[in-house]
Amino acid sequence: MYLDGKPRNTRLKEAVHQYKAASRAGLLERAFTAVFSGLVYPQIWEDPVVDLEALALTPESRIVTIASGGCNALSYLAVGPAHVTAVDLNAAHVALGRLKQAGIAALPTYEHFFRFFGRADERANLGLYKSYLRDRLDETSRAYWEHRSLNLRPRFTLFARGFYRHGLLGYFIGWAHLVARFYGVDFKPLLEAQSLAEQRSFFNARLAPLFDRKFVRWITDNKASLYGLGIPPAQYEKLSGGRPMHEVLRERLERLVCDFNISDNYFAWQAFARQYAPGPDAALPPYLQRENFAALQANADRLDVLHLGFTEYLQTQGAASCDRYVLLDAQDWMTDAQLNDLWREITRTARPGARVIFRTAAEPSLLPGRVASEILDRWNYRADESFRWTYRDRSSIYGGFHLYTFEG
């Protein structure tokens, strides 16, 4: 598939491959790009509530963000900024973002939109795609969703078969459920917990002991085992910090289970139920909340979803043309040269007061000592706020959340 001028996932390979193919590190990188070449994230795993607080958007804000599953780009759009540009190296994520944009513009009611993208498991969604969405898609995105997989069904049928159970992350979570079930763990009591104390009790009694199992230790301490979380070899080392991976994952899972009420945390529901919670008061990403649908419809034409790298896109933009940048955890993948190219372009295109947010697998910011001082000295690291937002991110999988503001 071609999107925006380059063969599908050529850009991904350019970003990830740092070692020769014949080396062990090079083989791991190429194995990662092979599994990462399709749909990875049916849902993005960065908390948009934290993002929106840190971004402090205004009606004049022009945002550049990595698209991933598209959830956060649309959640920003609901606030009413001037423009959102979502870029991604993964062609499947671009197709998903454009499908969601088409849904906002074309589906007749909130109920139709939520049934398709929120529940994503009803046969009636097949008719919604054919009647409202397919003709709103560009040719390349339509070809992606109508491509027949090995099961001979078009990809858009995923929205009638439990979309959130698919994609690389969905399959990884499904595999984790099988392992838990093998060891006798049932997540239903956790989903029904009425307090943080009950959630803590469940974690201590049922989940923490899993990480003492030899099989679980062996599989999580293997770099390739975490490809399902979208973690490439370069990021694996940063996440582990030299510690056994099973210890790190146990700590991150403890935050997810014990630090936030299960009823308020849709990330936990996706992890332990593989869906959003039922009922009218269920926690949802902002773009799926009823009260935001009218704003999304009004702002739908303020979004562009592009198959480009972040630096590559900024190189096409004028000086002082943007003021909000969302890098997710992409910098964990980058070499020093790539980091400097990225921040040189961010600095060139930044308006006064611009804000950059990103996450890292490890706790500290990775920029000091790696980005040239003549670039980084023009930015102010908001350490105290970053620390607080790290521990308010309900997805709980990252070591650090970071905010930099442009000082000019």
Image: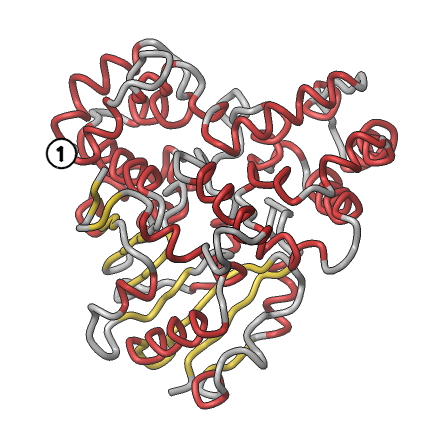
The residue where tag 1 is placed is 139
Amino acid, disc 1: Glu
Q: Residue at x 33, y 45 (%)?
A: 9
Above or below 298: residue 155 = above
| Residue 75 appears left or right of 381 | left
In front here: 252 or 149?
Answer: 149
Location of residue 1 in the rendering, given as x and y in whole percent from the top left corner: 23, 37
Q: Position of residue 163 (x, y in %)?
A: 42, 23
Judge the density around disc 1: few (<14), some (14-19), many (≥20) Cα neighbours within 10 Å.
few
Q: Secondary structure at mark 1?
A: helix
Q: State how many labels appear.
A: 1
Q: Where is residue 170 shown, x and y percent of the image? A: 52, 28
For the C terminus, which image quadrant? bottom left
Instruction: Provide residue 237's location: percent of width, then percent of height.
Output: 66, 57
Q: Residue at x 26, y 66 (%)?
A: 60
Query: Which residue shows up at 73% across the image and 17% down it?
Result: 181
